[in-house]
């Protein structure tokens, strides 16, 4: 049987067809769903990153263990317990609930951070495309994509920095001796504000802006470009397997690029007041104590956590956008907008059957 004309496939909408409200909502919810699943890995990563940080209340001959006990430097194990060893130690010494310490602040953070950094990305990219590109309908350049990722990265940190400070403090609190410093997320906000003022809630803003901008550019831009390449060359369709591959790749790229900044940010934001004389001093102390390898401390749990988180987040994000769009317009059959038709040609037409 021969088809005289190519029949178009039923295609899902491309990014420009989803409303901004849809993308903001889907990005925030998708990030929260991914956080619920991977949060213990993030707690282990934070504990590993602060493991060798010196505390002002500890003498030079003593070390602070993850469970809050002190032992002599000479008997302190030189080998890192690793991600699973850290998780086992937290469960054994603090209880399973401690793996989710700071979860409420983490979910608040994701609703703010991801909604802005991912939800606004396509619209910011389209805006920059009109400003910088000679042909606004052509595929955006790498520069425009990077600039878009940088912009949304700065936007989300500027708005939601306090949620990140509280999340880090609550996750790191289990490594402190004595009673828990924070018994709830709102008490944590109040405690930090009362002791350190409004500036305390924005502590680490500049390293976090740097870290989040770098992460955002490497994560979202790599996902955007890898997905576009796969779809354009017809290696996969715009469905679950494609989202998994792109999400995993984006997580690896982002972890390699952003790990040093993430370590410095975590150390600085979880530090006691006066422990470091700024971000540069924090970086110097990390290198002097552990060498340059210290900047990649916790890399494996960071990659496992970030890679799995990216897969989950992007899969949830893509599916939520479609579901929300279908519920909003139940009779609408999404089609490719004209200027995108050529870009996705290998996937838009069904080959003739002879």
Image (cartoon, rainbow, N blue to C red):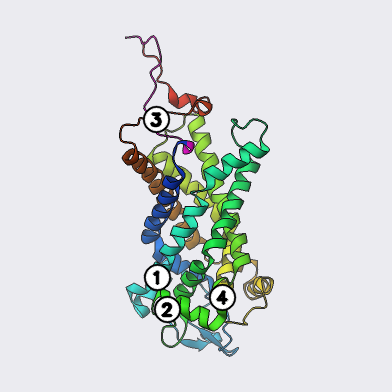
Measured Cα–Cα span from mark 1 to mark 2: 25 Å
**Residue bounds of the magenta highlight:** 1-16
What residue does disc 1 label?
87
In the figure, 120 relative to 264: above or below? above
Q: Is there a contact, CB below 8 Å, between mark 4 and mark 2?
A: no
Mark 1–mark 3 distance (CA, rounded to whole Å): 43 Å
Q: Earlier in the sequence, mark 1 or mark 2?
A: 1
CA–CA distance in space, label 4 to label 1 = 33 Å
Are the residues at dot 3 and dot 2 in contact (C-beta closer than 8 Å)?
Answer: no
Residue 125 shown in magenta: no
Q: Tag 4's secondary structure?
A: helix
Residue 98 visible in this rendered orientation of the protein: yes
Instruction: State the residue position of label 3.
Output: 11
x%, y% of residue 234? 47, 29
Residue under the image location 44 percent in, 26 percent down: 347
Determine contact: label 1, label 3, CB under 8 Å. no
- The answer to if 13 sits in the magenta stretch is yes
Residue tagged by mark 2? 187
Residue position for label 4:
198
Q: Which quadrant does the N terminus fall into?
A: top left
Crowding around mark 1 (Cα neighbors within 10 Å: few <14, some 14 to 19, many 20+) is: many
Give the mark, 1 or 3, whose residue is nearer the N terminus: 3
């Amino acid at each position: 049987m021969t088809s005289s004309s190519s029949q178009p496939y039923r295609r899902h909408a491309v990014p420009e067809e989803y409303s901004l409200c849809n993308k903001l909502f889907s990005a925030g919810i998708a990030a929260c769903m991914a956080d619920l699943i991977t949060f213990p890995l993030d707690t282990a990563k934070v504990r590993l990153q602060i493991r060798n940080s010196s505390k002002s209340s500890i003498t030079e001959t003593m070390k602070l263990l993850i469970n809050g006990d002190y032992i002599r430097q000479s008997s302190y194990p030189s080998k890192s317990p690793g991600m699973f060893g850290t998780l086992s130690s937290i469960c054994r010494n603090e209880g399973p609930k401690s793996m989710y310490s700071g979860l409420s602040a983490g979910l608040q953070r994701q609703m703010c951070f991801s909604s802005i950094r991912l939800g606004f990305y396509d619209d910011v990219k389209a805006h920059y495309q009109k400003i910088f590109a000679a042909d606004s309908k052509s595929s955006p350049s790498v520069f425009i994509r990077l600039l878009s990722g940088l912009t949304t990265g700065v936007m989300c940190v500027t708005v939601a920095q306090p949620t990140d400070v509280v999340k880090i403090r609550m996750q790191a609190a289990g490594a402190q001796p004595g009673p828990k410093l924070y018994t709830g997320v709102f008490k944590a906000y109040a405690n930090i504000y009362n002791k350190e003022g409004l500036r305390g809630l924005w502590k680490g803003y500049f390293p976090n802006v740097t870290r989040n901008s770098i992460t955002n550019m490497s994560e979202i831009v790599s996902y955007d470009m890898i997905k576009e390449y796969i779809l354009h060359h017809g290696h996969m369709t715009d469905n679950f397997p494609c989202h998994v591959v792109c999400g995993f790749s984006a997580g690896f790229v982002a972890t390699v690029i952003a790990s040093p900044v993430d370590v410095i940010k975590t150390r600085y934001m979880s530090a006691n007041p006066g422990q470091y004389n700024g971000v540069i001093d924090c970086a110097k102390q990390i290198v002097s104590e552990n060498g340059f390898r210290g900047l990649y401390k916790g890399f494996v749990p960071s990659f496992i956590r970030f890679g799995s988180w990216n897969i989950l987040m992007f899969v949830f994000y893509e599916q939520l956008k479609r579901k929300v769009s279908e519920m909003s317009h139940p009779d609408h059959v999404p089609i490719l907008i004209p200027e995108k038709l050529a870009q996705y040609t290998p996937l838009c037409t069904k080959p003739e059957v002879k």
